[in-house]
Every structure is written in structure tokens, then in C-alpha cells.
Amino acid sequence: MSTPDTWTAVDRYLVDTLVDEDATLALARESADDTTAGHIEVAPNQGAFLALLAQMIGARRILEFGTLAGYSTIWLARATGVDGHVDTLELEEQNAEIARANFKRAGVFDRVDVHVAPAAQTAAELIERSVEPYDLVFIDADKPNNPVYLAAAMELTHPGSVIVIDNVVRNGSVVDAGSEDPSAQGTRAVLAAAAADPRLSATALQTVGSKGWDGFALLLRVG
Ligand code: SAM
């Protein structure tokens, strides 16, 4: 029978079989212990999925909302290659400091900038500075602000860019239109905004695994 334990066992099997998580990535994942939020990083097979996606589209510039210990950032930064660049946005200096140490150990420090401030503020500054558009955006910070982050991502990308929004299922709470959970409402609002935007082609998938029952939305800028 399918239970959270079997989901985790299958994830372990898939990761052991397919995913090349080296020692520095494993250390980065474990270092989330010392962050302000604990282990809310992506799973190794999800990190590898993000990296493959970045490689498939030849992403050179990546924007990430939500750094934590930099685990997903390292997967993404390695996928961009030595000429790539990742801007990752984090609220907490404590997490940014841990992430920077992980970037040094992983050999990607030179291609990653951690911006410590509310992500909406940093994103507005990036728009104001007219930075070169990003090829891929990973939205994985505070969920109530997801609509703000998608709106910013639309200002900071180009047709052909890919946007991934994490944690859009939330144990099924996303279907509750009357939910009092601001994260569920932020998720519903961002999915509605994606659906209403003719510049986006979108889908979302449910996932089970070591991170429980959740899912992600995958958006392609078609205009
Ligand atoms: N992407 C990371 C990974 O998979 O390794 C995990 C990111 S974690 C889910 C979310 C992060 O967003 C936390 O580190 C949290 O401190 C940060 N965060 C929360 N609110 C934020 C805000 N308003 N602005 C920027 N970062 C925020």
C-alpha cells in the first residue's frame, strides 16, 4: 500500500539509482539544520530535476526566490556552467551566510549572488536596474507572496524563459477555496494569475516522495 514511508523508500531508491549528489551537495542539504527554517529544501531528485530543466533550455541566467542553505541554488548554478549566473533572494542573513559557505565548498561562489532582503524588494530593484533577463526562475520563498514573485518574474524574463513554482499542492490544501492558510491562498492566486496571462503556457504536477504530498507548477513564457 502507498504510504509516506513507501514514498520515501521509493525516493531513496530513485536517488541512489539515478542522482549524482556529491559530498558538497549532501553537506549543503544537511546544513539546512542550522538555518532559520529547517529542512524545507528540495529533495535530491527534485534538485536534479531543476538542474536538468536548466540544462535542457541552456539556461545561463537564473533567478531564485528563496535560498535557505543554497541546496537548490547549487544544483542550478552547476547547471548553468562556468559562464552562468544565479541571483538568489533570501530574507535571513543567517541562511545567506550558510549558503555562501556552501557555494564556496561547491565551487560555484563566483557565479552566485545572494541578495539579503525581502525578495519583493530585491526583485523590484532588479527590475529598476533593467538587469539582463533570466532564462529560468525558481519561485520557492514565502508562498503568500507568490503572485508578487510571478509578476516580478514576468518583468525579468523573456519569451522562452521557464518559471517553476514549488509547493503548489500543499497536502491538497490548494483545492480549498475558503482556506484561511495564506500559503494556500497565495498558491491559488499565483496559479490563477498564470492561467489568466496569455504570455504563459502552464501546467502543474502533484508529487509524492520524501517531502510528502506536494507538487510544482511549470510555466513557459510564450509571449
Ligand atoms: N530553494 C531552497 C532549496 O530548495 O534549497 C529552499 C528555500 S525555502 C523553501 C524558503 C526560503 O525563503 C527560506 O530560506 C526563507 O528564509 C526564505 N524567505 C521567506 N520569506 C522570504 C521573503 N519575504 N523574502 C526572501 N526570502 C524569504
Image (cartoon, helix red, strand yellow):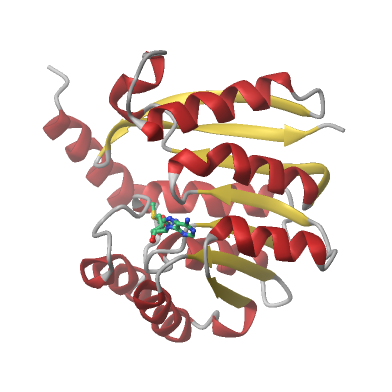
Q: Quadrant of residue 194?
A: top right
Q: 143 or 111, which is in the foreground?
A: 143
- In the rendered view, tell whether residue 208 sits above or below residue 104: above
**Residue at 83% of width from left, 31% of height from top?**
222
**In front here: 153 or 50?**
153
Residue at the spot 44% in from the left edge and 53% down from the top edge: 47
- 148 left or right of 19? right
- View quadrant of ligand 1: bottom left
Quadrant for residue 192, please give it. Answer: top right
The part of the image, by quadrant, that contains residue 175 is: top left
Against 36, residue 42 (above or below) is above
In the picture, which quadrant includes the C terminus?
Answer: top right
Where, quadrant-wise, is the N terminus in this rendering? top left
Up the image or down, 106 lies above or below 33; here it is below
Find residue 62 and report its horizontal and vertical position in percent.
66, 60
> Where in the figure is residue 116, as x and y percent of width and height?
51, 73
> Residue drawn 61% across and 85% down?
110
Closer to the camera in the image, 196 or 206: 196
Q: Position of residue 106 (x, y in %)?
A: 45, 79
User: How many labels, in total?
Assistant: 0
Classify residue 84 as left or right of residue 37: right
Left or right: 119 as drawn, with respect to 194: left
Name the spot of residue 100 as percent of width and height, x first: 45, 81
At 55% from the left and 79% from the top, the residue drawn is: 108
